[in-house]
Image: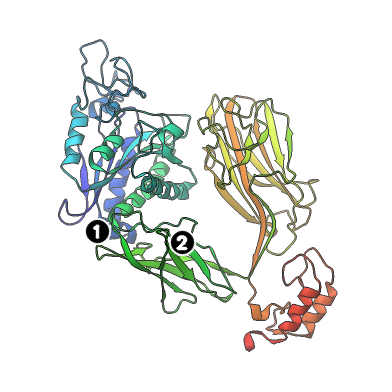
Amino acid sequence: MQGVRIGTGEEGVKPAVLFNGCQHAREWVATMVPTFIADELAAEYGVEPRVTALLELVDVYIVPVVNPDGYIHTYEEGGNRFWRKNRRDNGTTCLGVDLNRNWDIDWNGGESTSTDTCSDVYVGSAPFSEPESSAMRDFILARPNIAAHIDFHNYSQIILQNWGWTSTPPPDQEAIDALGAKMSEAMEAVNGFSYPHGGGDELLYLASGVFPDWTYDATGAFGYTVELRPAGSPGFELPPDEIRPTAEENFQGILEMMEWAGVPIAVTYPDGRPQQLRTDSSTSFNIDLSNGSGTAVSGNLVYRLDGGDWLTSPLAPLPSGLWRATLPSAPCDASPQYYFSIEASTGDVVLEPILAPDAFYTAEVVSDIVIAFDDDGETDPGWTVVCDASDGCWDRGVPVGGGDRGDPPTDGDSSGQCWLTDNIDGNTDVDGGSTVLVSPLLDASFEGATISYLRWYSNDSGAAPNEDTMVIEVSDDGGSNWVDLEVIGPTGPGTGGGWVDVSFVVADIPGVQPSDQFRIRFNVSDIDNGSVIEAGVDGVSVVSVACVDEACQGDINQDGTVGVEDLLAVIADWNCSSGCSADINGDLLVNVADLLLVIGGWGACNGG
């Protein structure tokens, strides 16, 4: 076996991460991804700021092929492309040990294991009976600075976390899950391909004696198995045109692991970061500084509203252990930017994002938010299901399938329920036709109306993968005429499962006008050959966000002065309830309330 260290300075001084591939010989893309990672890190050091900063903080060890003789056998003349084990002579007619069942953690524990030498999951004669596993063991034990580890495999397109052999949570469950979530989010952001994260019991199956479990048990280093593309078919033979995209999305995932390992304070946001600031009040939110090797002793929110000097606002510690950050109100023409500066007990100052102040978070400024429709799936506000399929008709409920056949394991917005294609465990996907989910009438007539939803679609398994589509259509006349909004599939992003958050400004949709007779529908079908087709819909909303500085709310014609012309506009629109320019307060009706806003704001805007 050969490997490489990529880092700066003396070996063993900094935290390190380990990436390896090809414990299982037939999983060729699992050799290519760690090789790509090594090449990218070396090429981008000194060129790309984030990579440069991380390699100053973290050493990276990469072993692309852990099973060299098995790997050679998959492509040599007379070999077997789908050979899994190494080539150990077992003294029987069957060769090979499954290296990923040979580690001394619940070895031969009965979860996907066998003592039959002919089995693909043969555990070997004893823990570490194989030269490959014992060599990797010795390598890791000699480097106690290794803080995290990824064992690359394919296929299933998931991130498996400790433990792999039991459903009992590990001691560091919260931190392990938080890092898994950050990697998953970063990977999906590259090409739109979802890598759900979780335990083997919920995403794949339990397995005894696996490498990442031993790493965590023996050294405390967080261990992950990343099952690369595809999510289903064509299995181990990933098409060549998907190799580089797979490597690129995983590269972003390993950068998250490097950042976690190298930065003593990991900053997370239990309720998310604010995307919007108000004109009339400050915005407070919580941050968690507990997931890291160090302890936070103080911190600042560093912000600016107009591109000028950076200002600071101290973080306030809360009894819960979280910290509270507060951003001030801002005028409509502001462009808020912010980052965090955290002092750790080690004396280090941690910046979040790591490249701050050159990198920072942003938010938009709003004064009015009109929510015309907001459906989290917990009730049915009037959806209609039209179905001529023999199975898989749209149904609403808490997902029960477990995600093992392309179906979502959970809903999209964490409320519990969502719409699914037949919410029954087992073989209940769409078959023999189409199922269509049609919304009730929606009011999308007001300025800036935006239609948003979460969708799930999987068509990449079964007898005829990647042949069908999910078609999402909208109508501005109650459903008499429909316009395609999205067509998902038959190949490409969004066809391998995973919740995808989508938004469209109604006025920007070709062929559609803002209307109070708006509908949306989701059409999923399995036509001709038998594919496994699963879909989900959740979090459907119609919302408008606007910003009008309080002092100028009555300036309807936007000439910088609230005056007679604005008063006349209110009179002209009196009792108007759809698409009204004089609906100043956004309540979908022009009335006395709007008139009073004009009178109250009379004169030049902003005191000018």
Of helix, strand and loop, which one carries label 2?
Answer: strand
Image quarter of residue 226: top left
Residue holding disc 1: 56
Residue holding disc 2: 286
Q: Position of residue 592 (x, y in %)?
A: 81, 75
Comes first in the chain, label 2 or label 1:
1
Q: CA distance from mark 2 to mark 1?
A: 30 Å
Horizontal arrangement in the rendering, residue 565 relative to residue 22 (left or right): right
Quadrant that contains the N terminus: top left
C-beta proximity under 8 Å, tags 2 and 1: no
> Between tags 2 and 1, which lies in front?
2
Image quarter of residue 150: top left
Residue kind at label 2, given as amino acid type: Asn
Quadrant that contains the C terminus: bottom right
Of helix, strand and loop, which one carries label 1?
Answer: helix
**Label 1 neighbour load within 10 Å: few <14, some 14-19, many 20+:** some
Give the residue drawn at x 68%, y 38%. Answer: 523
Comparing 132 with 3, the one in front is 132
Q: Residue furthest front?
A: 319
Horizontal arrangement in the rendering, residue 425 relative to residue 22 (left or right): right
Give the answer, above or below, for where 597 lies relative to 340.
below
Q: Residue furthest top?
A: 93
Q: Position of residue 209 (x, y in %)?
A: 29, 29
